[in-house]
Image (tube, coloured by chain):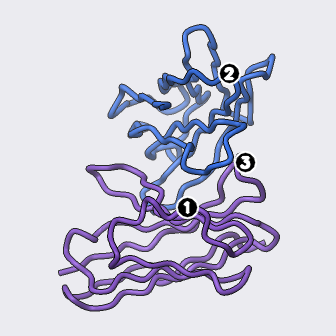
Chain colours: A blue, B purple
Amino acid sequence: AQKITQTQPGMFVQEKEAVTLDCTYDTSDPSYGLFWYKQPSSGEMIFLIYQGSYDQQNATEGRYSLNFQKARKSANLVISASQLGDSAMYFCAMSLLYSGSARQLTFGSGTQLTVLP
Amino acid sequence: DAGVIQSPRHEVTEMGQEVTLRCKPISGHDYLFWYRQTMMRGLELLIYFNNNVPIDDSGMPEDRFSAKMPNASFSTLKIQPSEPRDSAVYFCASSQEIREKLFFGSGTQLSVL
């Protein structure tokens, strides 16, 4: 069974600085996708970025980039130029691409990011 | 598009009462998911539908929980009777394909007293 590990329960970063949120995963399946979601204090879950296991380049979406190291089984989220509005809980998730079941979508326990002014 | 719409936003009820949570997925999305989020267990998939048909309900905690999707634009999650341990945030999410990113609703914060 696959597993997602986020080892940082909480992180602090100074406004305008970059921050890296760690995510490691474990699966024996070669075909998978990695997602990051943001959950602000208002509660909704917002999709940020996606990386496929066969993608050659690291995914980027604006200030978000995914540092994908396949051999290390890590998919760290990098937020550049942090803003106060980035303060939120961040979840890493993994999905098996050729599984026919949605139950294979696994979420990590989350990292609470606080951006300091 | 308005996104996934859930109601109510907050629900406070007494133990033993029936609770109904509602969800309107994004138009054109074939998959609808119900998740529960708690501090202890994180995000748990309760049930999901494909084209209005329940595919996997193995995450539904007990027979007290039931979910329906009578049409492509509406789903309900019902708890009867409710218990204090059901207190959680319940999310509805939808997607076009099973492996694609999920679009989540704002969630329903349920408190059972």
Quadrant for residue B63, please give it: bottom left
Please name the amino acid that badge 3 sits on. Answer: Glu
A30 to B28, vertically: above or below: above
Secondary structure of the residue carrying numbered label 3:
loop
Secondary structure of the residue carrying numbered label 1:
strand
Residue B56's disc is 1
Residue A30's disc is 2
Q: Nearer the viewer, residue B41 or A115?
A: B41
Residue B82 locus on image (x, y percent):
27, 82
Residue B17 locus on image (x, y percent):
26, 91
Q: Is residue A33 left or right of residue B33?
A: right
**Residue at coordinates 57% horizontally, 28% vertically from top-left?**
A77
**Residue at coordinates 64% horizontally, 18% vertically from top-left?**
A68
Residue A117 appears in the picture as rendered: no
Please name the amino acid that badge 2 sits on. Answer: Pro
- Which mark sits nearer the N-terminus, 3 or 1? 1
The chain carrying label 3 is B
Respond whether the residues carrying marks 3 and 1 are from the same subunit: yes
> Is the residue under label 1 in contact with that under label 3 (CB below 8 Å)?
no
Q: CA distance from mark 3 to mark 1?
A: 17 Å
Q: Nearer the viewer, mark 3 or mark 1?
A: 1
Please name the amino acid that badge 1 sits on. Answer: Asp
Q: Nearer the viewer, residue A21 or B62?
A: B62
Q: Is residue B96 left or right of residue B74?
A: right
Residue B100's disc is 3
Residue B20's disc is none
Q: CA distance from mark 1 to mark 2?
A: 24 Å
The chain carrying label 1 is B
Quadrant for residue B61, please give it: bottom left
Residue A45 locus on image (x, y percent):
54, 55
